[in-house]
Amino acid sequence: MFNTVSWPRSEIVLVPCELARAGDAVADANGNAVPSQRLHTGELAIWIADLPPFARRRLVLTAGPGPEPGPSAQLAEGILDN
């Protein structure tokens, strides 16, 4: 991933299914897990957090499931909590 602007960015990146056939597990260059989710379209959505200005980050897609989902949102008395 490349950040071509002069400010830090956090974005969801959509990888086409043709390029993301390796699997749903995503890691950075240090082997740290990166949040990802396979969409119903076959695309892989990856959360890129705090990419510095004019920087790049290398990600590796591998076989296996993505990270465990977090807690679900709850609705009670007209209040959505997540």
Image: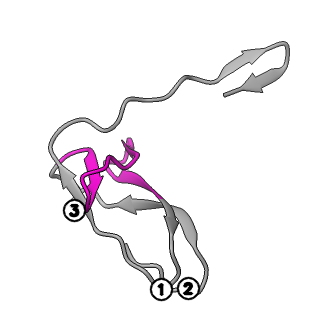
Tell which circle, 3 or 1, labels the residue nearer the N-terminal end. Answer: 3
Q: How many labels does the image show?
A: 3
Q: Which of 36 and 21 is in front in this view?
A: 36
Q: Which residue in the protein does label 3 denote?
A: 19
Q: In the structure shown, which secondary structural element does the residue marked by tag 2 occupy?
A: loop
Crowding around mark 2 (Cα neighbors within 10 Å: few <14, some 14 to 19, many 20+) is few
Crowding around mark 1 (Cα neighbors within 10 Å: few <14, some 14 to 19, many 20+) is few
Q: Residue at x 72, y 25 (%)?
A: 81
Q: Which x, y percent locates residue 68?
A: 37, 29
Q: In the structure shown, which secondary structural element does the residue marked by tag 1 occupy?
A: loop
Q: Residue at x 75, y 25 (%)?
A: 80
Q: Which residue is drawn at 25% across and 44% down?
A: 25
Q: Magenta segment, which residues?
A: 23-48
Q: Which residue lies furthest to the top in this view?
A: 77
User: Depth-wise, is mark 2 or mark 1 nearer the camera?
Assistant: 1
Q: Which residue in the protein does label 2 denote?
A: 5
* 33 inside magenta stretch: yes
Q: Which residue in the protein does label 1 denote?
A: 54
Q: How far apart are marks 2 and 1 (CA)?
A: 6 Å
Tell which circle, 3 or 2, labels the residue nearer the N-terminal end. Answer: 2
Q: Which x, y percent locates residue 2?
A: 40, 78
Q: What residue type is labelled 2?
A: Val
Q: Quadrant of the C terminus?
A: top right
